Image (cartoon, rainbow, N blue to C red):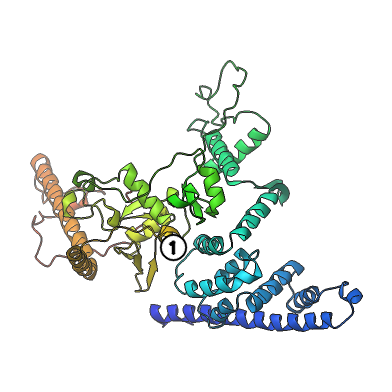
Amino acid sequence: MFDSWSDGDVFAVVEDALRQESMQVARKLAAIAQLLGRRIDEELAVDADARSMITGFARTTTEVAALINVSTAAARAMVFAAETLDQRLPAVGELLARGEVSWPTVELVIKRTELVADDLMAQIDADMAERLGSWSSWSRRRVIDAVDQVVSTVDRDGVKKRRQRAYDERGAHVSSNGDGMATVRVKLSAPAGKMVDAELSAMAASVCPADPRTRQQRRADAFEALVERRELECRCGTIDCPKTDPAPTPPAPRVSPKVVLNVLASADTVNGQSQAPGYLVGFGVIDAELVRELARDATRRLVEEPAVSRQEELRYRPGAALARWIRLRDLTCRAPGCSVPAEQCDIDHITPFNHRDPAAGGRTVPWNLACFCREHHRCKTFGGWCVELLADGTIVWTSPAGQVSRTTPGSTALFGLTTRPRRREDRTRVERARTRLCAHRATTEYNRYRNQAATREIRDRRWRNHTRRWRELFHGPVSDRPSTAPYMQWVNDPLEPEELQPHWQPPPRTPSDPDEPPPF
């Protein structure tokens, strides 16, 4: 169907289909809201005794479930969303009806504002409608954080209620997963979850390197060992395993693992002078009361862009202070739609670091560093994407087909942390250099490939000529006694010129292996 279409035409179809999908969802929910209104009017038209038997909401849910063949739970969520967009978030509903925002984003807004008081929803609705248009290329986690920040600012009481409800919903469930396996789901507080994660990681790392299990398999077995109150056994199968105790001794008392929770908040919030929310790294937005509770006995550190010395600029790896700043600025991978935490990402140079001459470009400075997960690091390095980091921390991604996406640092929307802007003359110089380099990128890459191929070709010719001369010295001219070795028939050929013709071209490049890791 699309075989003869250009990439741009295919992208246009995808964008239009997404817009039409949002509009159709809005149309469906508007119809459900109309049906709900009629059923509520019918409910109010009867006496109180009959009204208590079944509500208009329940009647609508049953009708929708039967009409579109979905479960009662799915129909209930659909009716609730329709009612919310009709009564509590009409401005957001208008954006959805015009196709200016996707349904998954609107669905998150509905869920995260569920406990907000009705008299505050008008303010949140207006705020959301104003912000949603700028949330392009945002991941699910970042949308949740942004909505939670707005809710925490407008309805502090609602945030406390939601936190208390979430804490009350903690629990553990074990369900059958088929094939003799089970799934364990546990809902804990963030500190308790970090403690369990650290304990499983420590136990998984306690076996020797020859253990054949993957890290996730060892963590699963560690959970079982933790329940049985025993150590995780190594399965390497070797007699002299360093983790096997030849004379078993009583296990030492278990020491709770050390857990580090990083909380990002303003100084006024920590000191009790502000009710602005904070951010628990790896978990999301938290209210000011929880910030102060976690910060009561914690080590506090001022987060600001560090000064980088000339010597540090010319090093490949950023220092601890600079790395901490980059991770706290970005919070997640900076690729469009990616939510991998910054702690699990590589800190990469936007302009590649020049290992031969560090002063020539690609310096280790805040305005040349960003967090990328391993997958998107490979896309940037080998996938043909052009990445540009602006002075305010915005990254402009240009795909090989020319599609442009922008991502902003995660901390910008939450706290306004940005990279220090360059001077005007530096911005002009960098912009000219970036434009020139992007325009000549393909030519530069091919010239590099040709020069490397030419060096290899000359080296190989010289080696073959050297081998021919040695063979002639020991066995005589090839015309009298040619070589019969099947793997060295080329020694019978005449000497090759050891200089290339001016218009010599190498063979076409072969595509690189996508699974080959870049040189991080």
The front one of 28 and 227 is: 28
Q: Quadrant of residue 74?
A: bottom right
Residue 349, horizontal then vertical, whole percent: 29, 54
Badge 1 amino acid: Ala
The residue shown at (79%, 74%) is: 62
Q: Is residue 316 visible?
A: yes
Residue 209, horizontal then vertical, whole percent: 47, 33
The residue shown at (79%, 83%) is: 41
Residue extending farthest front = 273
Task: Tell whether 101 sits left or right of 353.
Answer: right
Q: Is residue 491 visible?
A: no
The front one of 422 and 8 is: 422
Q: Is residue 183 above or below residue 37?
A: above
The front one of 314 and 227 is: 314
Q: Is residue 36 above or below residue 291?
A: below
Residue 435, horizontal then vertical, whole percent: 22, 69
Question: For mark 1, what is the residue?
Answer: 413
The front one of 215 and 120 is: 120
Task: Tell whether 195 sits left or right of 65.
Answer: left
Residue 356, horizontal then vertical, whole percent: 18, 48
* SS for dot 1: helix
